[in-house]
Amino acid sequence: MGMYSSITVHLSQKHPSKLLIMQPTKRSSQWVEDIKILDFWNGTVLVKTKAGTEYIYYNVSKRACINLCINDRMSLGFWVNENCIKPERTNFTFFVGGYNV
């Protein structure tokens, strides 16, 4: 990890102006395996845990998503707790092994 972060961005072929997925820089975490920002404009974030569960959070702050992508030293667990779990504006869907619970 250096001075600059890298962000992988995927754009829609049907709607090039609509951002679909942002992949923050990989980093180590005790709880989080991976985070993907599935829809930046609507604040949809996929969180995969090391235990194999997946959460899709809705209405996550756009500012928080950008901050996660820019700040590659931020703890993933801290970010999820502060921006996905704690805020009252967010809600989620819970998956275990690919099945909606």
Image: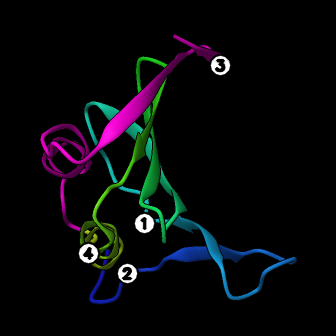
Query: CA gap, disc 1 to disc 4?
Result: 17 Å
Relative to 12, does residue 82 appear above or below in the rendering?
Answer: above
Please tell me whether residue 100 belongs to the stretch shown in magenta: yes
Query: Which segment is the magenta one?
Result: 73-101
Q: Quadrant of residue 1?
A: bottom left
Label annotation for residue 25 = 1
Q: Tag 2, which secondary structure?
A: loop
Label annotation for residue 98 = 3
Q: Which residue is mark 2?
A: 5
Q: Nearer the viewer, residue 55 or 77?
A: 55
Label annotation for residue 57 = none
Query: CA gap, disc 4 to disc 2?
Result: 16 Å
Residue type highlighted by circle 4: Arg
Q: Earlier in the sequence, mark 4 or mark 2?
A: 2
Q: Nearer the viewer, residue 21 or 86?
A: 86
Badge 2 crowding class, 10 Å Cα cut-off, few under 14, some 14 to 19, many 20 or more, is some
Horizontal relation, residue 51 to residue 60: left or right = right
Residue 5 pos. (x, y %): 37, 81
Which is closer to the viewer, label 1 or label 4? 4
Residue 82 pos. (x, y %): 13, 49
Look at the image and name its color scheme.
Answer: rainbow
Residue type highlighted by circle 1: Thr
Horizontal relation, residue 75 to residue 92: left or right = left
Q: Which residue is mark 4?
A: 63
Residue type highlighted by circle 2: Ser
Name which residue lies at 47% across and 63% down. Answer: 42
Badge 1 crowding class, 10 Å Cα cut-off, few under 14, some 14 to 19, many 20 or more, is some
